[in-house]
Image: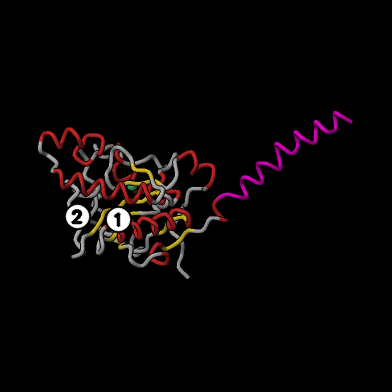
Amino acid sequence: MKKNIRFFIIGFVFTVIPFICYANLAPSVPLIDIKAINPEILVYLVYSTPDNFTGKDLYGHISTCYLRKEAALKLDKAQQYLNRLNKGYDLLVYDGLRPRNVQYTMWDILKGTTKQKYVANPKTGSIHNYGVAVDLTITDENGMPIDMGTPFDFFGELAQPRYEAKFLKSGKLTPKQIKNRELLRDVMTHAGFKGISIEWWHFNAFSIGECRKRFRMVDKFPVKK
Ligand SMILES: [Zn+2]
């Protein structure tokens, strides 16, 4: 009898639990157009134009920024908080969901170049591939991006938050530029995102460990109905 119970427990652990975990993954967590959650958030997908560091239009006709619902709700919270702090200021999103087919194209374009190290290997994936990372800045009351000290996708130490104190001291970043970055970090952190030390514009709604447990990577952009 005891042996039967042991077999039952082993069977449960190896068959039912993995099935429950699998069933809880991506299909039950929809991708959302962030403008449908909050139309005040501005979207300009730089990879939908040739004006990005690859020099190629990677997204084609896609102009919608998609995020997993939980990440989109956090972004809505960030926009609302920003409005409370600075009326007339808005979030301007440069990238959200980046499907894995695009990650492969990006990887192939930059293979063997000095820029390859700035792109995540599509085999392991980037948090953008899960639809829970966002690249963004802030616009002022005239709709102009505020000065962050470097443009988006600037590859160099000047764009890295970990060196801000050094560049402030040497005068390469002004107190105003640091203050602007701090405003972005403040609203994003308030909404539950985490920044990274190497790009002022990138924020994750979940860590890579949480992503792997909760979501699956997205292979292609959703088709609009
Ligand atoms: Zn990013």
Q: Is mark 1 within 8 Å of ligand 1?
A: no
Coordinates of residue 215 in the picture (x, y in percent): 52, 48
Which region of the structure is painted magenta?
1-25
Q: How many badges with numbers are in the image?
A: 2
| Residue nearer the viewer, 189 or 195 | 189
Which quadrant of the view contains residue 221? Answer: bottom left
Which of the image's four quarters has the N terminus? top right
Q: Which residue lies at the image location 48% right of the left edge and 71% below the top edge?
A: 225
Coordinates of residue 167 in the picture (x, y in percent): 15, 36
Question: Would you name the residue on which mark 2 appears?
Answer: 146
Callout 1 amino acid: Tyr
10 drawn magenta: yes
Using residue 85 as the reference point, say whether residue 20 is left or right of it.
right
> What is the residue that sits farthest to the right in this orientation?
1
Q: Which residue lies at the image location 28% right of the left edge and 57% below the top edge?
A: 85
Callout 2 amino acid: Ile
**Circles 1 and 2 in contact, beta carbons < 8 Å:** no
24 drawn magenta: yes
Q: Badge 2 local density, few (<14 within 10 Å), some, or many (20+)? A: some
Coordinates of residue 78 in the picture (x, y in percent): 36, 55
> What is the residue that sits farthest to the bottom in this orientation?
225
Local SS, label 2: loop
Q: Earlier in the sequence, mark 1 or mark 2?
A: 1
| Residue nearer the viewer, 119 or 132 | 132
Q: Which residue lies at the image location 43% right of the left edge and 57% below the top edge?
A: 72
Question: Would you name the residue on which mark 1 appears?
Answer: 94
Coordinates of residue 27 in the picture (x, y in percent): 56, 55
In three-dimensional space, the C-alpha distance between marks 1 and 2, rounded to whole angstroms, equals: 14 Å
